Image (cartoon, grey):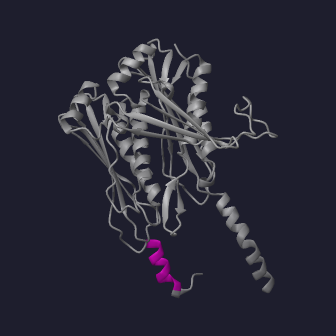
Amino acid sequence: MVNLAIIAVLAAPATLALGAGGCTSAELAAPQVHARIGPAAAQRVKRVVALPATCGSLALHMVRDATDHATWEVDECSRAALEGIDQAVRAALDFAGYEVIDAERVNATTAQRHEAEQRNGRGDGERTSQTVGATFNDATPFEQAEILQELGADGVLNTRIWIGADVGMSGRRTVAVQVRLVASRDRALVWARRCELEVGAGRDPLAMERAARCAAKGARPQ
Amino acid sequence: MVPVRWLPLLIVLTGCPWTAPTPLARVYHGPAFRAPAQTLAALPVVCATEPELCTPAHAAAVANATRMTLEFAGYSVVDSELLNAEMRRRTTKAAVSVSARAPDVEPAVQRNEFLPPPDAIPVDSEVSGGVTWAQASPAQQQDLLGAIGVDAVLQTRVAFGVAHGLSGQRTITVSMTVSRLDAAVVWASSCDVETGDYHSNEQAIELATRCALESATLW
């Protein structure tokens, strides 16, 4: 009787593991790619201005400040992460034959730059630079339309990233990246491509990159 | 054989709803439904509840999910937060220490495990001046939207119900309305999902957003 009890206690974690392993929720869903061709697909769109990616995430992390006050914040949509996704998407489209122009690098006005360098007697010091101007993203829609015309850009590319909420004990979540190209003349859709991945907890940056590469793959100019 | 004294407990447990209630979606086609709305201006998501429950991150997540789904469904969506009524001014500041001992010009290639790259130069960028769409007067807002070819406005709301039951569950409602610039409703969609035993707040927001969007775009 005692032996049976010991076996039952030892077997309990194994039973739990078998039970959990048998759950369908433990298996990650296969990547899904959705593509849509729009009414402007027949237009010649080759030179495109790429807007910065936008991001939203429901995978919140608790952050405690000095007073032990807890707040829920998003780690995944950091500026560095979004810049990385932008570069991955733009590089893929560049390679596919598009001429991609970074919107952040297009000046709407001529910028003014002021540089100053201060050094002490030993030759050490600080160099500062201040640039005041406006980029494509700071302009009004009318000014943006003029800039697109001046650049000879016939398309505008936007990227959206979405990270879903944690599901299950493993904290798996859905990461989706959507890349969309519209004609600059009338904002008609050329194509949109979307890739959704399901990943375990703590793998968002890698999943964002994989989803971005997956979404941008296969896009070619007419 | 189940002891008789456990029977009441078993009966009670069997009667418990172990599966989450099905999300409940409602879709309304307004008087302007027959007039096609192609280009939408998406307003910021309104999430008016206790700040601990609904953070700006929740609102940003719902906004992005909504906009990307509607864009994929064929709409052209303009983010109102990124719309400028007057050009804005961007000031970028960078500061770097210089030393008499180190060379002023950094080597072009620095990705070397023996010579790791220096800490990134802190760049501080600030946007000021100008007028965003949200700061403009209602008349200016209307004029700007009309001038850039926007024919409808998307309004999205997230609402948290009052906590009820032993687990303090709440009903989370995500609702979205597309109305033309003259305020005539094109369509509205709303979905309720329960939190508590069944879903975390974030899961419920995700489910309600997907449910409201799919109900609106899959007719």
Q: In the figure, B17 relative to B62: above or below?
A: below
Residue A147 in percent (x, y) is at: 40, 19
Closest to the observer, B31 or B60 = B60
| Magenta segment boundaries in residue numbering | B6-15
Q: Residue at x 60, y 19 (%)?
A: A96
Query: Relative to A192, does residue B100 appear above or below in the rendering?
Result: below
List x then y, in percent, for residue A217.
60, 26
Q: Quadrant of residue B28?
A: top left
Q: Does residue B72 appear in this view?
A: yes
Whether residue A154 appears in magenta in the rendering, the answer is no
In this picture, is A61 found above or below A50? below
Residue at image position (25%, 38%) is B136
For the residue pair A156 and A29, the one nearer the viewer reads as: A156
Inspect this view and state whether residue B73 appears: no
Where residue B161 appears, as percent x and y from the top left, is 32, 63
Quarter in which the C terminus of chain B is drawn: top left
Measuring from the top left, give residue B63's x and y in whole percent.
39, 44
Please tell me whether the stretch drawn in magenta is mainly helix, strand or loop.
Answer: helix
Residue at the (60%, 25%) spot, across then down: A92
Q: From this viewpoint, which residue is outermost toward the front?
A: A121
Q: Quadrant of residue A94?
A: top right
Quarter in which the N terminus of chain B is drawn: bottom right
Q: Is residue B51 above or below residue A101?
A: below
Q: Nearer the viewer, residue A90 or B170?
A: A90
Counting the numbered discs, the total is 0
Q: Residue at x 42, y 62 (%)?
A: B195
